[in-house]
Image (spheres, rainbow, N blue to C red):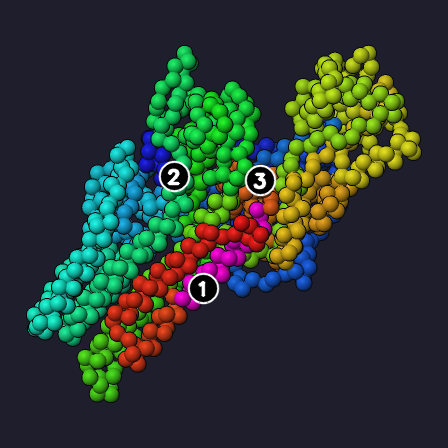
Amino acid sequence: MCAQCNNKKPHIHTAKPTAVSAGSVQVESGAIQDCCSSSVAASCCDSSSSDSNSEPGADEEPAAGRSSVRAIHASADNLVKPALSISSASLAAPSTMPELSVSHSPVNHEHHHEQESNSCSGSSCCSVTTSAEEEQALEAELIQSTHSNTLSWKVQNMDCPSCASKLEKAISGIDGIETTKVMFATQKLVVSCQSDGLAGTIEAKAKETGFPLISTRSKDSEAESKSFLQQNLPIIAIAVMMLISFIINKSSETYGLIAFTLTTLLGLVPIVKKAIVLGKGGSPFSIETLMSVAAIGALYLGETAEAAMVLLLFLVGEQLEGYASARARSGVKALMDLVPEKATVVRTDGTKEKVAAEDLKKSDVIEVAPGGRLPADAEVVDITASFDESALTGESVPVERQPGEQVMAGSLVTDKVVRLKITSEQGDNAIDRILHLIEDAESRKAPLERFIDRFSRWYTPAMIVLAALVIVIPPLLFAQPWNEWLYKGLTLLLIACPCALVISIPAAITSGLAAAARRGALIKGGAALEQLGHIETVAFDKTGTLTQGKPVMTDIVSWDGDEDRLLRQSAAVEAGSLHPLAQAVVNAAKQRGLMVVEASEREALPGRGIQGNVDGDTLLLAAADRLPESVTLNSTQQVEAEQLEGEGKTLVVAVRNGTPVGLIAWRDNLRDDTHTAIKDLKAMGIHTVMLTGDNPRAAAAIAAEIDIDYRAGLLPADKVNEVQLANQSAKVAMVGDGINDAPAMKTASIGIAMGGGTDVALETADAALTHNRVSELPVMIALSRATLANIHQNIVIALGLKGVFLVTTLLGMTGLWVAVLADSGATALVTLNALRLLRFKVKGEL
């Protein structure tokens, strides 16, 4: 199975080069820095753009006389200071995108011809290499290695992240293994090794460690479902033997002692074997080791019944932990199950054939009946049909798709039989990308999670030393009985197990990520999820983020009284252009039933606009401030033009045969949910600001409608500066389309992309809203805050119970079985508490 995309069929991922033109912005880090001033290398760049005085769609391009760059200042009353300071370095770009090249080309529309350039001049910058996170380096080696074999398996019996760590250590110790990675969320082991011949050795080692592997190379790789009896056989056996031992003990204490001893020894055999294997594999302080020492110690003290009870409680706790972990991974499994195993392919001769989903090729035409799901990303071919995309986007209402529109893999056909053309390569559809993102997210641990990992490394050895001191010091220094303090020391050993503490954060983060994915929000790991909870300022791009990104013609003013003639001739001049503004004029003419014929002698006039000959007339379309010197507007016409511009609209003046005859205005309308999103963010105490390259009047009109601060006339570098300044006093989230806004998104504490789950949206930002609903942003932040609260609760539960039983043990109030119950019970409690996040809802939701 492919390490990148879960695909079972052999295939190759090709690297897609990104062309960088002279007018490109190349981003290597999240901040612009002076040469040699940082450990992060920043490249000098050149950028060019065209004036956008009459272009709302080119959000990166400033209007003439653009405003100076100013800092974003959040209101002091609205700022909530984070409880934990998090470095933005923890939000590094994915290892699959070490360098981001963002193409920024001038808008090629006839209305814009005058270009202004802005460049960061300078000699080559000094580059200092930074050390990458250990997990990211490992992931990069796995994915990018070209000199080794990559093997993958599905892992069984993996109940918690610490299990994944144990398996990693054991497999890494095999000679010939280069890198090893266990993905807990998707239960997958990926190994980069020198030879395929090591597969058998790896499988044997994993089985010996207690985590059997299932090969993913064959179609029959799924594990057989086990019955309740098979799953719980060890627990049932120990329980029955304990019952028999208890009955025997009623008749004879001597034989009862023997029976309990045999029960304990039989139960200990697999645990001791696993402890030895884990110890050899680099995990000497595992719970199995602590359990073995405690049980053997209890037998030595003659506490045979208690030793057997400790084993039974341990097995029950392990089973409960496995059940809770399976529930936490249920969202990922449900996502994997969305892709059907079979698909109906329509051949060129019209015949239909059932084929395996992994055998589909790009450009194949498939037929899907109502109730069926798409096996790959596809394009509607023949008819308009409705698709339920709720499993991927969280949008409950079916979406209507026209012929030529894209539909994501896993979408459900709701109303009619439809034919679609496959557009994704094997292993590269929307679901594959999401699964890859989830696996990728595990290497980006939250700062809190990394702290707990470091803490647990010395916590268990420290507790073992404490237990040894408890055993030795009282008898040696205070003449206390050895047996009493040996018993207390063994109890402390069980309390020392850090399972509940270690799983407390990953369980909450996994649940939070799954809950976000259900709502159509993809978050790249715990670091991004944690960072979201500390956001104080949200900066928005305008076009395509706050607005729909599809300008429509809103006004046509005819000063000679013939609107239809003006619209028909304007559409003729614009006909054939793919620019959104031109298409809006043509569509408006067609909606009025006007015949549109392409104008002759169409010509772009640099610095002015576009003109053409229609019906014997020469029609020029140009911005009001770019009219020929021979053409002037009277005071009434000038007032009308300024009024439309004041409403945030882009307009051109129509000049027929040298005489101004009217105005045409466009506007990129706000999204339906933009007002709600801004209002909800303010209610949460979060400051909002709009960063746009549009002209100040258009930006002011949009900002006034939704009551948001704004900065207008900004180049990409200006947006970076704005976000940098804001980052000095607050945690900033930058929301954009994931392409043109990439520099600012990389500079912000966290970048959030709007988009339909495209490669750019998923790889550029730290999070993505796949459904394009900006109103989900406040929900995403609220979910992050709920996750942080859940993490704090889990840490209190894990450490609190251990602290209580530590004291009661030293006081002689509790024994071994209570210590096991404290450990297993705390593990189950924190996991179940984390699962509450799967049902997360904001106020007012049903």
Secondary structure category for the residue under label 3: loop
What's the magenta region? 776-797
Residue at the spot x=67%, y=35% of the render? 58
Q: Residue at x 27, y 37 (%)?
A: 221
Res 822 → quadrant: bottom left
Residue type, label 2: Met
Q: Which residue is mark 2?
A: 336
Mark found first going from the N terminus, 1 or 3: 3
Residue placed most toward the observer, 832 or 481: 832
Mark 1 neighbour density, 10 Å: few (under 14) some (14–19) many (20 or more): some
At label 3, counting other C-alpha atoms closer than 10 Å, the crowd grade (few under 14, some 14-19, many 20 or more) is many
Write down the quadrant of residue 451 in the picture: bottom left
Decide which of tag 2 and tag 3 comes sooner along the chain: 2
- Which numbered tag is attached to residue 772? 3
- State how far apart marks 1 and 3 are (Cα): 33 Å
x then y, percent, for residue 790: 46, 60
Viewer-proximal residue, 288 or 106?
288
Across and down, in percent, residue 115 comes to: 72, 33
Q: The disc labelled 1 sits on which kind of residue?
A: Gln
Residue 260 in percent (x, y) is at 13, 67
The answer for how far apart the CA atoms under marks 2 and 3 are is 23 Å
Type of amino acid at the residue the image marks with label 3 = Asn
Measuring 26% from the left and 57% from the top, which residue is drawn there?
282
User: Which of marks 2 and 1 precedes in the sequence?
Assistant: 2
The CA distance from mark 1 to mark 2 is 31 Å
Please state, as top left, top right, bottom left or bottom right, where the N terminus lies in the image. top left
Q: Which residue is mark 1?
A: 793
Question: Does residue 776 lie above or below 819 as drawn?
Answer: above
